[in-house]
Amino acid sequence: MKKIALTGIKPTGILHIGNYFGAIKPALALSREYEARYFIADYHALNTVKDPKELSAHIREVAAGWLAAGLDPEQVLFYRQSAIPETFELATMLMAFTSKGLMNRAHAYKAAVQENLEKQEDPDAGVNLGLFTYPVLMAADILLFDSDVVPVGKDQVQHVEMAQDIAQAVNFNYKAEILKVPQAVVQESVAVVPGLDGRKMSKSYGNTIPLFAPEKQLKKLIMRIVTNSQEVAEPKDPETSQIFLLYKLFAGPEEQETLAKRYRAGGLGWGAAKEELFRAANRELGPLRDRFAEISADPAGLEAALARGAERARAIAGTTLRRFRKAAGID
Ligand code: ADP
Ligand code: TRP
């Protein structure tokens, strides 16, 4: 029996190449070893995205994006969180086992309070209960599906630890393994993808290269990458160039070696280095972009794939929920 890997994808913006190399590719690689359950965490996104058009567009774009990047919905259980009502019933049950103090310690909530204090505002200004109870909903996502491992970025490890705490409180109370205690897996080897300005690529910095940017836009964005004022003739250090760091993501080892030599030899200007990056990026992203366009052109097909996933997911979710309700005396 394969172990179960589960992760949630928050549809809060369009996908960029940092998401692709930092989250999508590693998760797809993991799905070859594990029984994978990957879902769109749309109710989590509702905490921050209040514009209905925007939220619904992000849900579809992100779902189509994962499929275009190679997620096979026959292999991976792929669904929308909002299509699994058992999640919210479980979240309510988990609340009875979650101390308020645990939620007070969650990083996202603490950061919001800290920011308010610095602005001399009420500590809870602008904090909705969705943000405060975010870790309980996330625990429900995880515990509902008997997850063994939860692949996440470093910032989410605390949330997975809270899911462990909550599961253990339930199991301790009923003296039985009602809920499987999950483990976080952080892919340490995954590099931080730099953005156009050299900082970490992130939608909050506005320095991203969208994963499905049309060819022309891709080229334009790459040409906008900030460089230093070194002349064409000067030898350049590939390892300190963010153009080369990005190139490495798209090129094979031999190509990397060849281009690194040209950097070091001098005579390669930043413009030419960017051309090389564009060529390699477009080679990998071109087919993805075409698949994304195809999937997006068939919204009914996308809905149907998600609905099939949800149906299979609900069967699993029902089993967990019945087990817990029975143990709790609510059956
Ligand atoms: P953003 O920083 O653009 O808001 P998210 O926080 O929504 O991105 O990230 C979604 C996933 O993509 C996470 O697993 C995160 O670790 C990964 N990710 C985001 N940006 C990068 C990056 N620049 N390099 C590597 N991984 C990234
Ligand atoms: N909180 C995660 C993030 O911000 C998304 C998420 C929601 C998730 N539920 C999850 C991740 C369950 C792993 C497991 O990226």
Image (tube, helix red, strand yellow):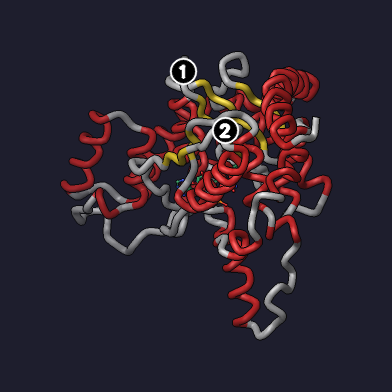
Q: Residue at x 39, y 45 (%)?
A: 274
Q: Residue at x 57, y 68 (%)?
A: 111
Q: Quadrant of residue 316?
A: top right
Assign a secondary structure to mark 1: loop
Q: Give the distance between the C-alpha atoms of the residues marked 1 and 2, in whole angstroms.
A: 23 Å
Q: Quadrant of residue 118?
A: bottom right
Q: Is residue 190 left or right of residue 70?
A: left
Q: Residue at x 38, y 34 (%)?
A: 250
Q: Is residue 303 left or right of residue 323?
A: right
User: Camera-side residue: 203 or 147?
Assistant: 147
Label 1 crowd bin: few (<14), some (14–19), many (20+), radius 10 Å: few
- Judging by the rendered image, the residue that carries numbered circle 2 is 176
User: Camera-side residue: 210 or 134?
Assistant: 134
Q: Residue at x 58, y 53 (%)?
A: 203
Label 2 crowd bin: few (<14), some (14–19), many (20+), radius 10 Å: few
Vertical placement of 135 versus 59: above or below?
below
Which label number is shown at residue 2? 1
